[in-house]
Image (cartoon, rainbow, N blue to C red):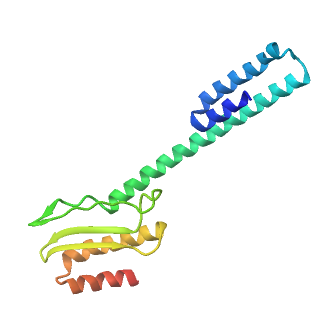
Amino acid sequence: AFAVAAIVASATTTARRTAIVAVAATVLAAASAFWNHNLATVEWWVRLAVTVSIGALSVILAKVRVRREHALRHMTAIAEAVQRALLPAVPSSIGSLGVAARYVSATNEALVGGDLYEVTETSHGVRMILGDARGKGLDAVQMAATVLAAFRRAAATEPTLTALTTDLDNVVSA
């Protein structure tokens, strides 16, 4: 029963703190011989061995969990940076047009996806795109990035919306 504390610690705290809990559990398991009156019996040695083994395993599990959490935080930061690069903040207004945009993923775990939006003022007028690339994961992100890059280029160079949409259709169809 003493080893349960180390298991709980491995799921909630650092490997160092888990090791402290495991050592404390081992000391208590060893000291239990005094109130159970079974010092150096097979039962006492088994209790001690199980507590030490589970404590060591708990420290290893805590190290693995902490390493994975660190990697996940790193990947989350990268995904958020990609999202900000793909969908930068839009200006609050362009000319007399008020603009606002907010990205909220349909999936809590997905920080970046195939959604896309952009608004820009060109010599041909205000151009705006709002879309969702087909698919999921990195393929959708890549398609959204491709469409946004094509839109940013074509919005400034194509004189009509028909020419702009034709250009975007050619990029998506390729």
Left or right of 137: which side holds 90? Answer: left
Q: Is residue 69 above or below residue 136?
A: above
Q: Residue furthest right?
A: 42
Closer-to-camera residue (144/107): 107
- Residue drawn 22% across the image and 86% down it: 162
In the rendering, at what x and y percent does residue 3 appear? 72, 30
Tag count in the figure? 0
Q: Is residue 55 above or below residue 106?
A: above
- Residue drawn 77% across the image and 16% down it: 31
Q: Residue furthest front?
A: 36
User: Which quadrant: the N terminus?
Assistant: top right
User: Which quadrant: the C terminus?
Assistant: bottom left
Left or right of 64: which side holds 120? Answer: left
Left or right of 67: which side holds 117? Answer: left
In the rendering, at what x and y percent does residue 101 appear? 26, 62
Q: In the figure, residue 130 lies in which quadrant?
A: bottom left
Q: In the figure, residue 37 lies in which quadrant?
A: top right
Q: In the figure, residue 161 lies in which quadrant?
A: bottom left
Left or right of 146: which side holds 54? Answer: right
- Residue drawn 76% across the image and 22% down it: 29
Q: Is residue 166 above or below residue 132?
A: below
- Residue drawn 51% across the image and 49% down it: 72
In the rendering, at what x and y percent does residue 87 appear? 31, 62
Q: Is residue 119 above or below residue 61?
A: below
